[in-house]
Amino acid sequence: MSLTIEKTFDLSLTNPNDQDYKDLAGKIESSINEGYSKLLGYIDKTAKVNNFRAGSIIADFTINSTTRSLGFSSVNTQVSEILRNKGISLTQNAFAQCEETTLYNTTDKLYPSQTVMLNCAQSVEGEIKWEVNKIDPAQNSQKYSIVNNNTSLIVKNVTEHDRGRYSCIIQRNSIPYIQWQKIVIEQLPTINVGENKRIFPCNGKPVLLKCCVNAGYKIEWVLDGVVQPSSIESGCITLNHTIQSRNCKEETFTCRLKDLQNLLQYSYSNKNVTVKINEEFDCINEILGCGKTDDMVKGTCDIGMEGNITYKCESNKMWRKKLDNCVLKVIKDLDRKAESLVVGEIPVFVSQLSNAAEQNIDNITQSVATVSTIVEILSKIADLSQTIFIDKPVMENFLKTVDVIVSDRAKGTWQDLKNGNISGNTSIKLLQAIETISGRLSDNNFTINGTSIQLNRTKINNSFSGISQLPNSTTLVEIPKVPEPIFITIIVFTNLDNVLPTRNANNENHTSDVSLNGDVVVIKVNQTINNISFTFDIVNETLGNPQCVFWNLRLNGWDPTGCEKKTLNETDKVKCECNHTTSFSILMSPILVMSDKELDKYLSYITYIGVAISMVSLILCLIIEMTIWKSLRRNDTTYIRHVSIVNIAVSLLIADICFIIGASIAKQGQPTPEGPCTAAVFFMHFFYLALFFWMFISALLLFYRTVMILSQMSRAKMMAIAFIVGYGTPLLIAVITVASLAEHHKYITKTNACWLNWDESKALLAFVIPALTIVAINLLVLIVVLYKMLRRGVGVRNQPDEKHTLVVIARFIAILTPLFGLTWGFGIGTMVSSAFGIHVVFAILNSLQGFFVLVFGTLLDSKVRVSLSGKLSPSKLSSSRTRSTSAGTSSKSRLDFIRRMRRNVFNFSEANTF
């Protein structure tokens, strides 16, 4: 006797992108055969992988046996070790025995809004739990109820999204026994009657009431419970009703589902049309009814289309079409299916979509709403594909669909979209969908050639040069060198000039008088490439002055940043070289500075020169602090202050080093390498936050010495608090941020810069909120301390003149502003504006912060200068002290007020504030 038993592996691959699925299937089959070969009853070499599906990665496979009682437990550990030795990492309890069964034991179809009960047949003993598409339903008590000792699952108010695999899992020994059933929920009936209130004249003429429904349903017209005779045509029925001129009255007709009496309780099962009578009108139509000038009504679509058309009563007494929202029915049906699409259905679904697009190309390319709907479907597919790898057949069908909607036949449709002010969103969404799905291609070399699209997926070992094979296109892509072998995807489009808008990213109004004058190339690579060059044919030589640009997905416009035009001998070609840089202002701003190329260069120079000066200054600062450290330990206030200065310098130095590393591995306009970038961003995030928290501690110490004069705290206690706040808090914030987002690939930016993500997860707020909060607190401390100092100066004899007092206050503010991080307040400006000037000021002030720490935190400190003098020359130290005492005696009266102002204001006032 030979039995077929279905088994399931749940395989979590260590690096799925490096796996060839055919090779992976072979490894699994050979491992199972090797591990199960000693089992009595197992038919050797019968293990077969049927398919892969989502979950970590799930491999469904079958084996053949002469008995149902195989001792799997004894060999599971051995098979696991075999698989791990072949480079495959398994999850816990990876093995499960499965059986497709009937959990919902009725032959009736399931429709939206119904309640469903599924029952688990407990044929074996063990704890029972349920799963719905790999999710525990117990987490959603409003949607699901588990009753009858866990043997029954109730699903309330089902929708199309509830379709999928329902599993009853009985845990027995080490092998779960899974009973599962694929539950299908019928699509929601969509009944369309157009305007639900129609006005007609009482003239005894017939009126036509049309009702349509999506495929798979039947409908009927009913008046006062009586079914009315209607003509039926392709999913629509038309009621020819004559208003009796002798008995004019208002009547309500109902279009309802036919032969589905159990659904009549649900609101979606019927739609009403009320026929009203009026003798005053400007426009009249037997379907739309009558209305006054400027009235708007909705009518049904033509046969084969779904949606509605909005008409307006014009001054010429005619109803005129204003807005057509009719979508081809076959595409609308696929759109509804896409709402509840699961990963495993993508290959079949994409094939159905491309077939529908190619078979209905004329209707699709002439319908604005249909093109928009197809773009929405493609976007949903691209988003869903992020958990799997896309092979050539799926990508080929995806691009076939794109080829249809961007063809020359659709040029007028895209122009209508532009005139309706929605082309930008639709075209951008299409480009994003193409980029998103092309980033999930399997690591195999292949080429796809369409009418106006060519895709080349290839592995580059050293350099690359490829030319387009499309008709009337000789676009050349060159990559001079790659650091290591990588897979790259190159897609060339010859018709995207029909689709993409021509607006300029540099202009806040996005207006532009330019036009696309060549092919559009999409490059997808998961590592950093420092330089790519493109040589394009110039389509229209009369336009002149070609520019090299890339589409900036952040600002939704064409941007020349980092791209340079090269001179060629050929007059009908243009060569572009793109190599982007990162500016310092990205630390605060979610808005990249998109200025012209020269200004962007200036900002980059400011950033790197300023950071270099800061790093050298910080190293000098630490050397000086180490040299005089012993002399600073005698006084608690001086000691704590210089502990803060040292930790500010260390945190800023390491953060700047991480910033330079991050800038070198991420290029604007290119994908960021996730592994190296994640590490750089974590340390950058941690040490920049540590910088802010140590500046916060410095401000608190100043506040403590100024306001709480009589309070005393031990050195050990102050140091403990300082280090817990200075490093513990930023570490906690950084760890929580990376732990919660890195797994979902939303921790770092996807392109342009190596920094915290903004567009998807708003992770940047984990830096911005603490930083700006500390800046605000430090500013408040500065104001309070100034107020206290001025209050102490009131009524003092021999007060210095007002001008000198203002100078003292100005110096106080100038010195403490960089040490308290107040210059980072300009980050608010970079967050809300892309104005180049704001980013320049921010970059100058904050890239030079290390220099300010050296000057204001160390060199202007009188104790530091005295200690350095003592280290360099003991005699100089003695004379310095003598001169200082003499000067103090001779000018005691004049400086009395200043000394009073200084008193008890930490060592900031005594050593460097004045």
Image (cartoon, helix red, strand yellow):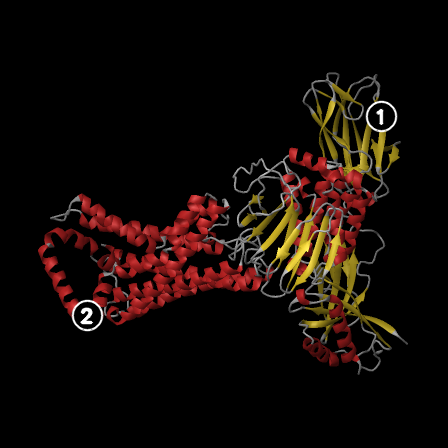
Q: Secondary structure at mark 2?
A: loop
Residue 241: which disc?
Answer: 1
Q: Is 514 placed above or below 443 here?
A: above
Q: For label 2, count other residues whose C-alpha is less than 10 Å away and answer few (under 14), some (14-19) or many (20+).
A: few
Q: For label 1, count other residues whose C-alpha is less than 10 Å away and answer few (under 14), some (14-19) or many (20+).
A: some
Q: CB of mark 2 within 8 Å of CB of mark 1?
A: no
**Residue 611 is at least partly visible in this image:** yes
**Would residue 887 be found to the left or right of residue 195 on screen?**
left
The residue nearer to you, when weighing 280 against 654, is 654
The residue nearer to you, when weighing 403 against 79, is 403
- Classify the position of the N terminus by image quarter: bottom right
**Residue 159 is at least partly visible in this image:** no
Q: Is 572 placed above or below 388 here?
A: above
Q: Position of residue 478 (x, y in %)?
A: 63, 55
Q: Secondary structure at mark 1?
A: strand
Q: Position of residue 894 (x, y in %)?
A: 12, 51
> Residue flagged by tag 1: what amino acid is it?
His
Residue depicted at x 30% and y 49%: 783
> Residue flagged by tag 2: what amino acid is it?
Ser
- Residue position for label 2: 873
Furthest residue toward left? 890
Q: In the rendered image, which quarter is residue 672 located in? A: bottom right
Mark 2 to mark 1: distance in Å? 113 Å
Residue depicted at x 32% and y 63%: 645
**Would residue 775 be found to the left or right of residue 733 on screen?**
left
